[in-house]
Image (cartoon, helix red, strand yellow):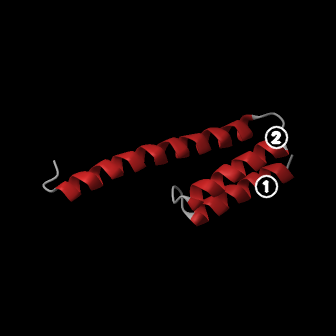
């Protein structure tokens, strides 16, 4: 348990942010899984996933370089169809 009011507030904020980050990461994982398992990949699907990845990187949920790596893999999947 936190000893001060400010520590208690930081704890609440951390829990809130962790929950939000977890849901965003889960959503990204689901989008990428859909694209990988789809028999035919559409450009719209990949565009939506790239947009979600960019938003996650902008919000600090995933690292900028990790976002670039994921987007490169999606582009490679689109090119190889």
The CA span between labels 1 and 2 is 11 Å
**Which of disc 2 and disc 1 is earlier in sequence?**
2
| Residue toward you, 7 or 26 | 7
Q: Residue at x 34, y 51 (%)?
A: 13
Q: Residues within 10 Å of mark 1 (few under 14, many from 20)?
A: few
What residue would you read off at disc 1?
76
Q: Residue extending furthest left? A: 3
Callout 1: helix, strand or loop? Answer: helix
Image position of 52 (left or right of 15): right
Q: Which of the two discs, 1 and 2, sits closer to the camera?
A: 2
Q: Residue at x 84, y 41 (%)?
A: 42
Image position of 39 (left or right of 36): right
Callout 2: helix, strand or loop? Answer: loop
Q: Residue at x 12, y 54 (%)?
A: 3
| Residue toward you, 64 or 81 | 64
Q: Residue extending furthest bottom? A: 65
| Residue toward you, 6 or 35 | 6
| 17 to 27, vertically: above or below | below
What residue would you read off at disc 2?
41
Q: Position of residue 50 (x, y in %)?
A: 71, 52
């Amino acid at each position: 348990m936190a000893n001060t009011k400010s520590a208690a507030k930081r704890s609440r904020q951390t829990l809130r942010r962790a929950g939000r980050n977890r849901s965003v990461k889960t959503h990204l994982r689901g989008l990428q899984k859909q694209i990988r398992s789809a028999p035919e990949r559409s450009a719209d699907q990949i565009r939506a996933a790239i947009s979600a990845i960019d938003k996650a990187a902008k919000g600090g949920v995933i690292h900028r370089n990790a976002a670039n790596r994921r987007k490169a893999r999606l582009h490679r999947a689109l090119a190889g169809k």
